[in-house]
Amino acid sequence: MNRTSVICTVAGVLAAGALVASTTGGIASASSGGRSHTLTFTTHQIASTGAAKDHHLLIETDRATRSGRTIGYTANTCSFDFAAHRAHCLVTLARPRGQMRVWATVDVDTGTILGKVTGGTGIYDGITGTVSGHPGSNPDASTFTIRWNG
């Protein structure tokens, strides 16, 4: 898996999971009484392009799936810190009832992703949490787990 795909795919997945659903299958909102939620899902790259002359920026979109079903789409922008072997990504997951934002850091050597849910719109307004991820079984897929309260 190339490093660019890992970074973007991971970022996309993280955002998608946070918005999707609680472990009971419902859609979570910030006003749902502070319950804890965990969601694991996979992202699949749709398109990716390098930006800036030295390709230190990456813009990508992904399809987020759970159990083979599409649960959302992401738009990701990542900037690379080549010296530190890291990418810092802003991910937005679009869902029918709102959007969620995630800031994530990707270790480009291992594909490991760690980040925070930093807010959203619609029913996701005010949600906070964490995200973690790793490369999937093919170069254009990654697996994520999002934990949030809401």
Image (cartoon, rainbow, N blue to C red):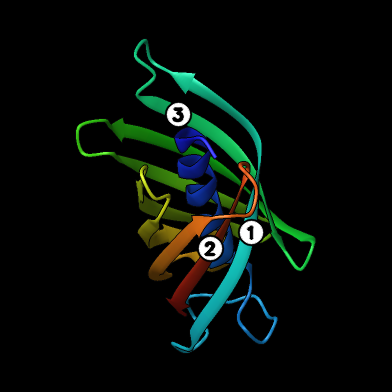
Q: Amino acid at mark 2?
A: Phe
- The residue at which mark 1 appears reads as 42
Among the two numbered marks 3 and 1 on one chain, the one whose residue lies closer to the N terminus: 1
Q: CA distance from mark 3 to mark 2?
A: 20 Å
Asked which secondary structure carries label 1, the reply is strand
Quarter of the view holding residue 77: top left
Q: Are marks 2 and 1 in contact (CB under 8 Å)?
A: yes
Q: Dot 3: few (<14), some (14–19), or many (≥20) neighbours within 10 Å?
A: many
Give residue 41's position: percent from left, percent from top: 62, 65
Asked which secondary structure carries label 3, the reply is strand
- The residue at which mark 3 appears reads as 58
Q: Where does the N terminus fall, quadrant-wise?
A: top right
Looking at the picture, does residue 12 appear above or below residue 125? above
Q: CA distance from mark 3 to mark 1?
A: 20 Å
Q: Amino acid at mark 3?
A: Leu
Residue situated in front as seen by the camera: 63 or 36? 63
